[in-house]
Amino acid sequence: MPSINLDGREVRYELVRRPVKYLRIYVMPEGYLRIVSPTEDVEDFIRNKKSWILEKLAVFEEIPQETFEKFPLFGRFYDVEKSSKTGICGNVLCYQSYPCFELFLRRTLRKEISSIIARYSPLIGRTPNRVFIRKSRGRWGSCSSKGNLSFSLMAVSLPEKLLEYLVLHELTHLIEMNHSRTFWNIVGRFHPDYREERRELRRWWVIVRNNPFWKRIMECQS
């Protein structure tokens, strides 16, 4: 993967050639750039975005070392051990196999999401049609026009307050499908610190995408 020097920092980038009208740049959770461009001549474009890129990459310097050694569950980092059973054993997450580990995480997340929906649905006057847990690598959650909510399995790693915000966010889309002022007014009624929580969600996305246990789970065939 090629790299470019930005103020003394070597930044790796992946070039994706596509017939797009404008160049697009993405800072990937693994700490490199993805450039979507109709041409290979992209380095001037990257340099023009230097300040924005370095600001985004600064998030990676805040990743706790535990991210690479332990597994995050509801914001707490656990040691992980292979065992004859799957579940929380004191301060350790035990698992028989990665498919069993995934099933445990699905059940745990669904139970927590169901509890949050049960609390907030009467308050906002909306109930989802169906709720899906998916192995999504692109977003924490989504709401469909059919009234279905989908959540990434990786959301089970989030601290409970952030998970609560995430579920409320998607529930609110049952009222407003876009991010209008009305949408944020509803969210802010229950989570006045939603701007900070959005920033925290971006930080946690970096954490889970760099966690080695999550990488194995997401690669595992269900």
Image (spheres, helix red, strand yellow):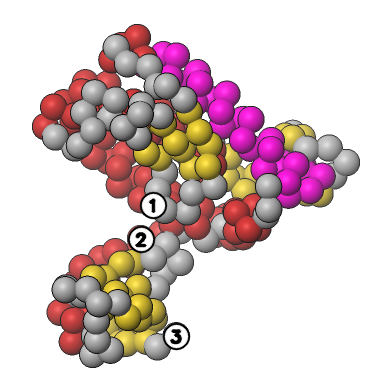
Q: Residues within 10 Å of mark 2 (few under 14, many from 20)?
A: some
Q: If the image is split into quadrants, where does the N terminus sit?
A: bottom left
Q: Please say if 118 is above or below 46.
A: above
Residue type highlighted by circle 1: Arg
Q: Are marks 1 and 3 in contact (CB under 8 Å)?
A: no
Residue 102: mark in rendering: none
Question: Mark 2 sits on what residue?
Answer: 59
Residue 105, given in percent of the width and then of the height, sits at 63, 37
Q: CA distance from mark 1 to mark 2?
A: 7 Å
Question: Mark 1 sits on what residue?
Answer: 203
Which label sits in the foreground, 2 or 3? 3
Q: Please say if 9 is above or below 219.
A: below
**Which residue in the rendered view is the most extreme toward the right?**
84
Residue 11 visible: no
The answer to which quarter of the image holds residue 8 is bottom left
Q: CA distance from mark 2 to mark 3?
A: 21 Å
Q: Residue at x 88, y 41 (%)?
A: 84
Residue 46, given in percent of the width and then of the height, sits at 22, 80
Give the residues drawn in magenta, as a range: 93-120
Residue type highlighted by circle 3: Met
Residue 126 visible: yes
Question: Mark 3 sits on what residue?
Answer: 1
Main SS of residues in magenta: helix
Residue type highlighted by circle 2: Val
Residue 119, given in percent of the width and then of the height, sits at 41, 13
